[in-house]
Image: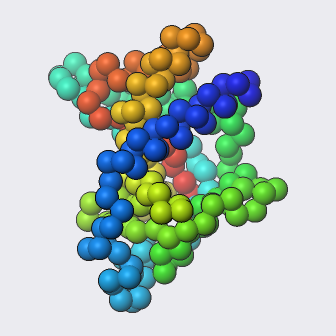
Amino acid sequence: MTRYALALALMLLAAVTAQAQDYVYDDLAASPAVDSLQAVARRNAAVAGSWHYAGPAVELAGRNVVSSLGKPIVKGKVKRSLKKIYRKLHLSGKQAALRLDAQGNYALWVRGMGDVARGRYVYSPAQGLLTLYWHRLPVTCHVKAGKRLGLTIETDHMLKLLQLASSIVHNRHLADLAALARNYDHVNLGVELKR
């Protein structure tokens, strides 16, 4: 079980690293340094708070009519697979929290470990993006804000790694996730959080 968790963690790290190369760090238009504190607080009001794990989040964009028709079924299957993987990683409601304040600071809290990551974030509601900066490394998530907060990352690079890993490890859940790369142009996977 721990080797699967380690393999998944390494793949996520590789995906985030590859994703970080796609984004430019000096996004001055949305930088809190340029905006007034009041403007930042107004913009961040929709996401500010303490958020806990509620379940997996999946967003799909297909290439053709067939993939569009099967999207709800595939989405449900992927959510179930992610839920099993997250459960193996001990990700549950009150075990971890993402705390976002209105001034653009965040902390990732894990029970028994305290704050494991801190930094700044930039929320761009018009683009539906939330970028967490950790040691100047941007991790950009697609965000759906409301009563729940859906955070997903583009997984094109990660799915290619999952295809390789599933062929080596022969894990059904990894194989289900890897199959998405063949049928959908854009796959975003992540978590849904609740206050």
Report the front residue among 145 and 101: 101
Q: Name the image quarter holding the C terminus.
A: bottom right
The quadrant in which residue 19 appears is top left
Report the front residue among 162 and 137: 137
Toward the left, the furthest residue is 65
- At 45% from the left and 54% from the top, the residue drawn is 139
- At 51% from the left and 11% from the top, the residue drawn is 167
Is 107 left or right of 59, judged from the image as shown? right
Percent from the top left, x then y, of residue 138?
43, 57
Residue 103 vs 119, above or below: the answer is below
Percent from the top left, x then y, of residue 79?
50, 32
The quadrant in which residue 186 appears is top left
- At 22% from the left and 19% from the top, the residue drawn is 66
Q: Name the image quarter holding the N terminus.
A: top right
- At 69% from the left and 36% from the top, the residue drawn is 89
Percent from the top left, x then y, of residue 163?
45, 18
Toward the right, the furthest residue is 112
Is 81 left or right of 160, judged from the image as shown? right
Does the rendering let one see residue 56? no
Is 24 left or right of 172, judged from the image as shown? left
Percent from the top left, x then y, of residue 194?
56, 57
